[in-house]
Structures are given as structure tokens and as C-alpha cells.
Image (cartoon, rainbow, N blue to C red):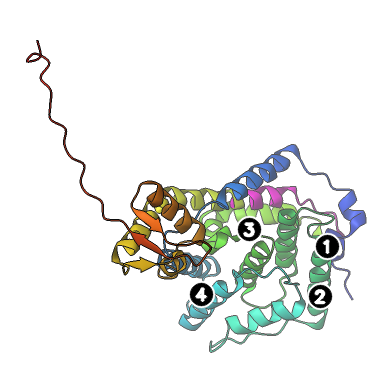
Amino acid sequence: MKEWAVMKSFEKSWLDGRQVSLAIAGQLRRIGEMQGQAEYYEFPTIHMEETSRSIAAEEASAATERLEKFSDSNETRNYRRLRLEVQEYSPRFTLTSGEVLRLHKELFQDSVRSGGSFKEEMTREAVKHLCTGYNSVCGYEMDALLSIGAFFLDFHCIQPFLEGNVRVADLLAIRLLTSQGYSMNRFVSLEKHIEATRRDYYDAIQMSSLGWNEGAHDLTFWWSYWLTIIESLYDEFAKQALALQVRRGIKTSLVLAAITDAKQEFTIREIQQSLPGVGIELVRKIFKAEQIAGKLKCLGRGPNAVWKRIKTRPARRKKAICLECKE
């Protein structure tokens, strides 16, 4: 059997001989900061969140069509469905060759082309070793983003299928990113950014795959491109967040409207349950603010305490005093 370089990319002895450049280290630092900021981004409503996810899936499927140059409505629909599936967070996810094969099979479901089989038995073994290698070093011997990037490159070098390699690689990348806590790809399209920079994409793969069969390849070129793409995803996600910067104002308005429309007496939990897109902590803060303002009164204690609205009278206008008349 051919000795695939996949045996090298995730081997500790091979990794010990690699050095991460200062530029790549800087990219990892910036991405870490961007990820920390992204954790505070919220969508005003569940509907808006689901809409954003659907748009990202649509953009992703369209980008893969252009990149792989195919036109099959069933495959497009399958990719969109699979993309929504793999972006769901699963902390216990373990990458296997069986999962790789399943994605390929479902991608070509009801298509004129068939899926679900590797090119040859030797390829099956290579993918198996690739998955084992990734699982053994990701987050331990190698930074998670660099591990996912190395997996992406090795997968492209193996080309385990006759068709659909790019789409399966994209789906796997999204699955791995999400499993490591990088969930921004739920709302922005990794595929769209790759397709928009396709020349750089292919150049980076070509440069980093030189000497791959002998395990003499240099991942630096690909890692630099890969991390640039991740940064661009966070940039787009941040722009979405800025566009929704009034989200807290919207949520506050929703809570206040729900209080106004509620029956005379109600609980915090009842108001929150009527607004699934609003967190319970925000509802409590608004109730507290309204209580301080004299607009709400709490009739008990504890999480199930009953609240009621207080009718307020408009402030009486003070009679203006004419300073000249006082003289």
C-alpha cells in the first residue's frame, strides 16, 4: 500500500519539526479576540436567527455550485440540508471515516450520480488514518484551527471520491469548526468566502501540497490562507452584529409591550415564555428597572412572584415664575 503523507501531517515527530511563523501566531491571536467578542452577539428574535442561518446555507450551496461547476437541484438541496445539520454544536463529536462516507452518500441522494463509496480500498485506509490523526492531536499537540486547516489540506490531497470532494471537505470543515466552538459559520458562509478568493485558495493548496506524498510539504501557505478566511468570517459576522446593534433596544421594547398587553397580574416567567427570543436575565433586569421607576410592583418573593402594573399619573406642570414680576 502506498505510504500516504497523511501519516506525517499529524505525527508528533513531524509536527515537532514544524514552526509557526509570527504572522500566523498573530492571526491566531486576532481570531481568539474576535471569537471572544462574538460570544456577546445575539439576535433579537428566534425568527431573525433562523433567517440568518437559512441565508448562509443558501449562499453556501450557491458558492459550492460555482466552485465545483455542477448543476443538480437534488445535490443543491442535499448540500443545504447537510450544511444546516453539520453546523449544530456537538461537543462529543468524533471524526470517523464512516462520517465522511455518510456525508458523501447523502450529498448524492436522489442524484443522477452515485455517492457513498471511496475510489479504492487504499483511499479508505488513508481517510481512516487522517481521521485518527486529527482526533489525536486537535487541541492537544496542535491548535484547533491549525488542526482543522491541516485536515482540510490533507483531504484535498487524498481526493477520496471521484466527485464532490470540495463539498464534502467544506461540510467536514464546518463540522469540525463548530465542534471546537467556532460557531460563526452558522450565520456566514465559509464556502462563499472561499469561492470569492478561489485563486488564492488554489494557489495556497498547490504551494502547501508540494512534496506532500513524501511528507516534505509546508503547511504555512495553506494555514495563512485558512486563517485569513476565518478572520473574514468573523469580520462579516461582526458587521451583522453591528447592523443589529439595536437588538437590545428591540428586545426591551418587546418585553415592555408584553407587560402592557399582559393581564393585570403576571410573573417574570410568563412574560419570558411569551418571548422565546429573549433571555430570562434580560427580562428580570427590565422588571427591576420598571420597579425602580415606579411602574411595576412585586407582590411576593422568589422566582414565581406575582407582579402588577402601577397606574401612573402624568406629572403636574409647575406654574412658571416670572422673575421680572417679582421685582
* Residue designated by label 3: 182
**40 left or right of 210 in image:** left
- Real-space Cα separation, disc 2 to disc 3, in angstroms: 24 Å
Assign the N terminus to one quadrant of the image.
bottom right
In the rendered view, tell whether residue 319 sits above or below residue 257.
above
The reply to whether the C-beta atoms of the residues labelled 3 and 1 are less than 8 Å apart is: no
**259 left or right of 107 in image:** left
Q: Which percent across, then down, holds residue 316?
A: 18, 40
Q: Nearer the viewer, mark 2 or mark 3?
A: 3
Residue 275 versus residue 271: which sits nearer the camera? 271
Identify the amino acid type marked 3: Tyr
In the rendered view, tell whether residue 77 sits above or below residue 300.
below
* Residue designated by label 2: 128
**179 left or right of 189 in image:** right
Principal secondary structure, stretch drawn in magenta: helix
Q: Earlier in the sequence, mark 4 or mark 3?
A: 4
Mark 3 Cα shell of 10 Å, populated few (<14), some (14-19), many (≥20): many
Can residue 242 be seen in this snapshot? Answer: yes
Residue occupying image coordinates x 62% and y 70%: 171
- Real-space Cα separation, disc 4 to disc 2, in angstroms: 26 Å
Q: Nearer the viewer, mark 2 or mark 1?
A: 2
Question: Which circle marks residue 30 in the picture?
Answer: none
Q: Which percent across, then down, holds residue 156?
A: 70, 65
**Residue closest to the far right:** 13
* Residue designated by label 4: 80
- Real-space Cα separation, disc 2 to disc 1, in angstroms: 17 Å
Q: Earlier in the sequence, mark 4 or mark 2?
A: 4
Q: Secondary structure at mark 1?
A: helix
Mark 1 Cα shell of 10 Å, populated few (<14), some (14-19), many (≥20): some
Check if residue 227 falls in the magenta segment: yes
Q: Which residues are magenta?
A: 214-229
Question: Which circle marks residue 213 in the picture?
Answer: 1
